[in-house]
Amino acid sequence: MELHRPVMPEETLLQLAAGRGGLFIDATLGLGGHTELILQASPDNRVIGLDRDTEALALARTRLAPYGARFVGVHSDYRRLKEVLADNGNEPVAGILADLGVSSLQLDTPERGFSFRFADTDAPLDMRMDREEGTTAADLVNDLSERELADIIFEYGEERAARRIARRIVAERVKTPLTTTAQLADLVIKAVQQKGHWRIHPATRTFQALRIAVNRELEGLDKFVADAVEVLAPAGRLVVITFHSLEDRIIKQTFRFQSGQCQCPASQPVCRCGAFARVEVLTRKALLPSEAEIAANPRARSAKLRACRKLS
Ligand SMILES: C[S@@+](CC[C@H](N)C(=O)[O-])C[C@H]1O[C@@H](n2cnc3c(N)ncnc32)[C@H](O)[C@@H]1O
């Protein structure tokens, strides 16, 4: 299997200021690509890597074994960052990276159910990053109401045909429960009835929406940023890479709040949001991958990188 290529590697190391030695946290370890680069950037770097996917964690541990005690892998959701750090010595943190989204391992393994590309298999409609957690995509498409499904597909997939797709799901599931990625991909194609050449597969947005819902990807992202800023040492860096506009919007707004911009409505004369400058934002505009990187690694296409530095 091809290893997940770390996205925007040079930009990430630069924004993390990874050459200076210290403890880094990789909040989304995946297959350990970024972590390995951080470990190579200075012999004095150590990394605690978190992932909620036990399969990714096992592969990353094997890959990073040559770095010995400089790497510690933890099975955890990054929303438990503070607890993980407390369990691991509560040291000042030089930098934190979150490379959000799915890994190649998850996308390329049919049984994980993340992809609409495996039309000729019985790939289950799963999509859980942490397979120890409960709800799968099949649970959602078979149990939610038409209205709830339409809202999820519209909101998280930004899919204009959300109502038509939800109607079709409900019409099909009464005949036979939806259990495979192929069934879902097929019914979305029929619901959308898009003719001619597809720029992207018609089921792309529906699959993205269900994945976000199954893994509650947008929940607690703002709290994660606040916790990350709290545990950083002065001058410590936080780098976040996002892959869709909903995530990026949350990161952009949370960075603004952390940098002291008041979030209160203009009509409110006194600030009640408690904004004060905890960080300096280092990327006025999100950094994007170069054309060359996108050509070599098409999955980098929608990446946006934002970084901030903790003030003293
Ligand atoms: C894009 S991949 C990271 C790839 C990694 N940077 C590399 O270079 O190999 C994202 C990873 O984040 C993990 N992940 C997503 N949400 C998470 C969460 N809330 N807590 C912990 N890990 C999460 C996924 O399981 C996936 O393995």
Image (tube, grey):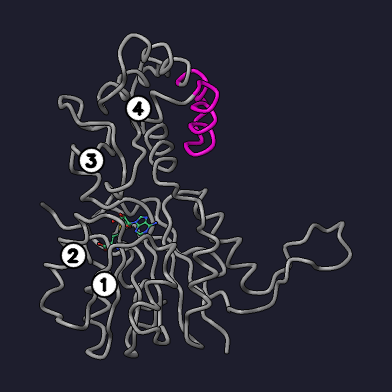
* Foreground label between 4 and 3: 3
Label disc, if present, on residue 79 of the rendered structure: none
Q: Alpha-carbon distance for marks 4 and 1?
A: 36 Å
Estimate how packed mark 3 is, as few (under 14), some (14 to 19) or many (20 or more) residues with alpha carbons within 10 Å. some
> Residue 269 is drawn in which quadrant?
bottom right
Q: Alpha-carbon distance for marks 2 and 4?
A: 36 Å
Question: Where is 46 relative to 290, above or below?
Answer: below
Q: Earlier in the sequence, mark 3 or mark 1?
A: 1
Q: Are marks 1 and 2 in contact (CB under 8 Å)?
A: yes
Label disc, if present, on residue 112 of the rendered structure: 3
* Foreground label between 2 and 4: 2
Q: Amino acid at mark 4?
A: Trp
Q: Alpha-carbon distance for marks 2 and 3?
A: 18 Å
Q: Earlier in the sequence, mark 4 or mark 3?
A: 3
Q: Amino acid at mark 3?
A: Arg
Under tag 2, what secondary structure? Answer: helix
Q: Main secondary structure of the magenta part?
A: helix
Magenta-tinted stretch: 145-165
Percent across and percent down for residue 41 are 26, 83
Q: Which residue is mark 2?
A: 60
